[in-house]
Amino acid sequence: MLKYDIIIIGGGPAGLGAAVEAYEKGVKNIVIIERDKYLGGILEQCIHNGFGLQEFKEELTGPEYAQRFIDKVEEYDINVMLETMVLEITPDRIVKAVNSKEGVFTIKAGAIILAMGCRERPRGAIMIPGTRPAGILTAGTAQRYVNMEGYLPGKEIVILGSGDVGLIMARRLTLEGAKVKAVVELMPYSSGLTRNIVQCLEDFNIPLLLSHTVIEIHGKDRVEGVTIAKVDENREPIMETAQYISCDTLILSVGLIPENELSQKAGIELDPITGGPIVNEMLETSVPGIFACGNVLQVHDLVDNVTAEARLAANSAIRFIREGEFGKSNIAVKAGNGIRYVVPQKINVDNIEKRIKFRMRPVNVYNNAMLVVKSGDKYLLRQKRQRLTPGEMIDVNLSKDILKNANLEEGIVFLVEEG
Amino acid sequence: MELKEITCIVCPLGCRIQVEMEGGEIKSVKGYSCSRGLEYAKNEVTMPKRTITTSVRAIGGHLPLLSVRTKEPVPKEKIQEIMLELAKVEVKAPVKIGDVVVKNILGTGVDIIATRNLYVK
Ligand SMILES: Cc1cc2nc3c(=O)[nH]c(=O)nc-3n(C[C@H](O)[C@H](O)[C@H](O)COP(=O)(O)OP(=O)(O)OC[C@H]3O[C@@H](n4cnc5c(N)ncnc54)[C@H](O)[C@@H]3O)c2cc1C
Ligand code: SF4
């Protein structure tokens, strides 16, 4: 069986970043497996700007950001298998894949890096009564139609959900001549980045209706309109507020979920909240030698963070193939009051060189709150944060010295203290 | 005295910046985290600008479209006009990332550049 030091599954920014890092650190017997025709992943259809300010100190579009890494992959002549789909991975790191040239084949890895990205919550995941006419599609599909295939999905549009993809598409469709009548958001806040609300909605006077939802879809063969209503604190529609909006297209931007069928089949433990694998400080999953980075681990807003994560995964994979297993994690990491999840979910302080970055999301919007890390009753860190919102991932760096003060039995907890 | 609250969009951090204005003059700027943000806030209260990202029709390429952007931000009120102008543009593959697709669009002094490689089909 053909053997590689590192097999990277997925050729988006996470996979590309991991490959370039491994190569630059001297591990060259590696391969990227990508099911699509091209490298770049989701970035290929994200033609808007807003990528790379941290990584390259300039503002790039998605394809430009991806190309910087693709150029390196080509320059280094890193092995790439395109139009090749990974079907299965096993705990002993055998990868089974298929393509039209070789059919089904298996290869063995010293370490595997999962970089499969995420997918959109499908239409079936939300329950809207009414018929199922044509003209309902997800924001990512709309993005692909408009930006890759050159086809406008409709003229009068309502967008349900204010995630980044939905916001970006509100502007994109407006620029292409469609009328976006409203962006309807169930929650009292948007899950998108502030900058996207300013740049994509406010600039074009597109109304953002918070605490609203679509309660009915009208039309037989094609969407003719939707009924929307305000919702109460329990997210139940308030019927007296129902109003009809005529439109020919309803776009759903109701969230992304990490793509983890492969991981699950390999027996990798998943975090029910992130939908991604449970990892340690090395970004290693519950199966030794299998690492995860990018949107397959947790849905990121910023590709720069994906690249940073990919580098860490690559360095950990290298350490694994050189030194073997890392030893058990000894501190559990938990999400406390106000925090939805924290990655990594467990750590082993002995493996940390100087400091480690934790990434998390709050459950709500908080202004001038304290972000706190505790171990039992002991405070390890208290940081004032001007604004916390679920749409923006929070980073917290903790040094090894601070972590040494943690009580191993209690673990550490991240939480928000208000007031 | 007039207080303008601006959300900086130069980078995804989205800092909230408060600009104090008096008689069309900037009195004070607060809340920015870097010099790019300071500059953005000053411009936003006097002459707002945006980078336009869109696509133009392509012939003979691996995709039917070529994604493009304004090389620098352009005045916000020009967005519509530039979009109409770009609707008339057609390019032939191959195109290299960074190639100028339209020079000095509508006299703004800003070029339209390709944001991806377009290969011959
Ligand atoms: C619409 C949208 C707008 C965004 N806007 C911004 C922005 O303005 N600024 C910013 O910084 N970030 C933005 N992001 C976030 C950023 O682009 C993503 O977080 C990042 O692209 C994720 O990279 P990834 O490599 O993890 O996943 P992806 O890019 O999704 O790549 C995963 C790859 O894995 C492949 N794959 C999956 N399963 C298999 C398999 N079984 N076999 C082989 N290959 C497989 C897929 O085909 C895909 O190419 C945006 C994201 C979206 C969706
Ligand atoms: S002020 Fe600087 S850091 Fe803050 S959003 Fe603007 S560019 Fe980003």
Image (spheres, rainbow, N blue to C red):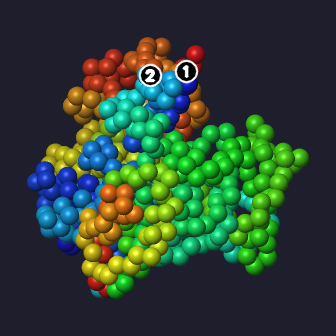
Residue pictured at 32% horizontal, 45% vertical: A53
Which mark is on residue A175? none
Rendering quarter of residue A408: top left
Give the camera-side residue of A182 and A317.
A182
Residue B69's spot in the image, x, y percent? Answer: 37, 61
Task: Work out whether residue B1 or residue A130 is closer to the camera in this orientation and state it.
Answer: B1
Q: Residue furthest top?
A: A378
Residue A312 image point, x, y percent: 26, 45
Q: Nearer the viewer, residue B118 or B74?
A: B74
Residue at the spot 40% in from the left edge and 63% down from the top edge: B106
Up-down relation of residue A404 to residue A276 (above or below): above
Q: Residues within 10 Å of mark 1 (few under 14, many from 20)?
A: few
Q: Residue placed at 27% from the left, 38% from the top?
A: A327
Q: Is mark 2 within 8 Å of ligand 2?
A: no
Which quarter of the figure is the C terminus of chain A placed in?
top right
How far, Cα to Cα, is label 1 from label 2? 9 Å
Q: Return the disc, 1 or 2, that comes first in the chain's sequence.
A: 1
Tag 1: amino acid: Met
Task: For mark 2, name the chain.
Answer: B
In the picture shown, does residue A145 fall above or below A158? below
Which residue type does callout 2 highlight? Answer: Lys
Left or right of B9 in this view: A126? right
User: On residue B1, which mark appears?
Assistant: 1
| Residue identifier under label 2 | B27
Q: Is residue A284 left or right of residue A251?
A: left
Label 1 residue SS: loop
**SS for tag 2?**
strand
Chain letter for mark 1: B
Residue A382 seen from this side: yes
**Numbered marks: total:** 2
Most extreme residue toward the right is A240
Residues at discs 1 and 2 in contact (Cβ within 8 Å) = yes
